[in-house]
Image (spheres, rainbow, N blue to C red):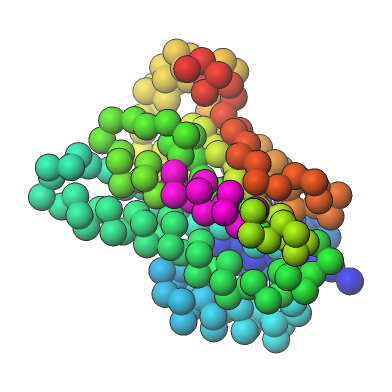
């Protein structure tokens, strides 16, 4: 019987690539996304609970949760709209992951191999200028992952985080190609941005039944960018 996965942010980017790779490996992947049909807003616990009920009716109990939903958010502390950016970033990038894990928790605990993978960012390990709402949310997501690993590990559920570096997704497509190339040459040892599929394969590897001893890990997939310091 196919394992059942929930992938948030699965309508685009890393989430869509992850859902596709999971399906290629035999899992039944349900996509939760505000751009999905029907839409699912991870900020809203009721929207998430309703979506989980639909998964139960259509596919069965959930074995895998991948929290890939995320939005960019920037600004500096003195900006007029900073508090709104802060709340927006936390609601989607951190609180949304909590809503999804809580809604799926009973299934994960009942599974023979419950798996949680949270998609953080290299911004969850360091900090860049003018991105603090996003950075704080991603640092929080790593802390949430580690706490889940400690709380749930003895109960058969693993939780890990993947931290993508510069990746060709909707968040980066607005950057001119020449600027991306310059950044990659200067800051990424492999000399280019990553693809969503490259991130997805690491995520899916962590969902495997065989990945049972990987728990609480925070794995960078960044072409060596953070190794440069």
Residue at x 61%, y 78% (from the top left corner) = 52
User: Where 38 sits versus 141, above or below?
Assistant: below
User: Where 181 sits versus 215, above or below?
Assistant: above
Residue at x 46%, y 64% (from the top left corner) = 96
> Is residue 117 visible to us here?
yes
**Which part of the image, by quadrant, shows the N terminus?**
bottom right
Quarter assignment of residue 104: bottom right
Direction from residue 134 to residue 54 in the image, left or right: right
Foreground residue among 196 and 81: 81
- Return the x and y of residue 2 as percentages of the image width and height: 84, 68
Direction from residue 179 to residue 35 in the image, left or right: right
> Is residue 170 visible to us here?
no
Q: Main secondary structure of the magenta part?
A: helix
- Return the x and y of residue 200 as percentages of the image width and height: 66, 45
**Range shown magenta:** 138-149
Direction from residue 153 to residue 179 in the image, left or right: left
User: Where 164 sits versus 35, above or below?
Assistant: above
- Return the x and y of residue 188 as percentages of the image width and height: 52, 19
Is 148 covered by the magenta stretch?
A: yes
């Amino acid at each position: 019987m196919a394992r059942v996965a929930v992938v948030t942010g699965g309508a685009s980017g890393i989430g869509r690539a992850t859902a596709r790779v999971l399906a290629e490996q035999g899992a039944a992947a349900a996509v939760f996304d505000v751009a999905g049909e029907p839409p699912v807003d991870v900020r809203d616990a009721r929207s998430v609970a309703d979506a989980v009920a639909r998964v139960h009716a259509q596919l069965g109990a959930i074995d895998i949760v991948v929290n890939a939903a995320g939005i960019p958010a920037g600004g500096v502390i003195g900006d007029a709209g900073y508090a709104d950016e802060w709340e927006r970033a936390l609601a989607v990038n951190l609180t949304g992951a909590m809503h999804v894990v809580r809604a799926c928790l009973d299934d994960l605990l009942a599974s023979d191999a419950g798996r949680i993978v949270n998609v953080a960012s290299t911004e969850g390990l360091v900090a860049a200028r003018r991105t603090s709402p996003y950075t704080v949310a991603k640092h929080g997501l790593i802390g949430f992952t580690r706490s889940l690993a400690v709380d749930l590990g003895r109960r058969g559920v693993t939780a890990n985080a993947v931290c993508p570096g510069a990746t060709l997704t909707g968040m980066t497509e607005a950057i001119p190609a020449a600027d991306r190339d310059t950044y990659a040459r200067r800051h990424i040892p492999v000399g280019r941005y990553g693809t969503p599929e490259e991130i997805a394969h690491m995520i899916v590897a962590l969902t495997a039944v065989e990945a049972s001893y990987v728990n609480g890990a925070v794995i960078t997939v960044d072409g060596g960018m953070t190794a440069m310091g």
